[in-house]
Amino acid sequence: DNKSKIVFLEQSMKYLLCRMYLASQMMELGSDSRFTSIILFRRYVGQFQKVIHHNCQQKEQNQKGRKRAHDNDTQPSVQEMKQIKCHLGRIAAACLFLGCKAEEEPRRIRDVINLSSILDFEDAGGHST
């Protein structure tokens, strides 16, 4: 079901946005760098959602002509959810780094990675599905 992936993405995105905001406070970033990072992440997630939606639609169209063995073939698997959470966490850290660079308030990549690890960016949502 496409809706379950979208809901999952929205929950993960909200979690990561809060973590990004917290990380920017811990790094003592100015508001320009903070919000540039958040906007970069939000734009990426918007495009990512479009790609996932398109892939789900193609999967459903491919299965319409065939007799389904299982009704939940389009349901996202637990493995897919874990991969998406990990992926979005890394993207959030990258956006934080790029937001600092764009606003001429650079931070070392090692500091951003360490902070994203401490704040558990790669386990977006902190719960398993």
Image (tube, rainbow, N blue to C red):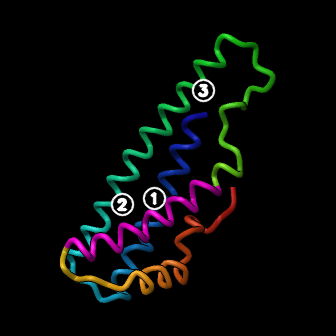
Residue carrying label 2: 41
**Residues under labels 3 and 1: Cα distance?**
24 Å
* Residue hosting label 3: 59
- The amino acid type, in three-letter code, at marker 1 is Met
Categorize mark 3 by other alpha carbons within 10 Å: few (<14), some (14-19), many (20+). Answer: few
Q: Position of residue 84 (x, y in %)?
A: 57, 54
Q: Using the image, determine if residue 114 lies above or below residue 92.
A: below
Span shown in magenta: 82-102
| Residue 93 part of the magenta segment | yes
Report the quarter where the C terminus lies: bottom right
Extreme residue toward the top, this view: 65
Q: Nearer the viewer, residue 76 or 98?
A: 98
Task: Give how far across and how far down residue 53 sits, in percent.
Answer: 48, 35
- Whether residue 96 is in magenta: the answer is yes
Which quarter of the image is occupied by the N terminus?
top right
**Residue 28, relative to residue 53: is it above or below?**
below
Label 3 residue SS: helix
Q: Is mark 2 on a helix, strand or loop?
A: helix
- The amino acid type found where label 3 is placed reads Lys
Q: Residue 98 carries which label?
A: none
Q: In which quarter of the image is residue 29?
A: bottom left
**Residue with the mark numbered 1:** 13
Q: Which of the two discs, 2 and 1, labels the residue nearer the N terminus?
A: 1
Expressed as whole percent of the image width and height from the top left, the position of residue 67 reads 76, 13
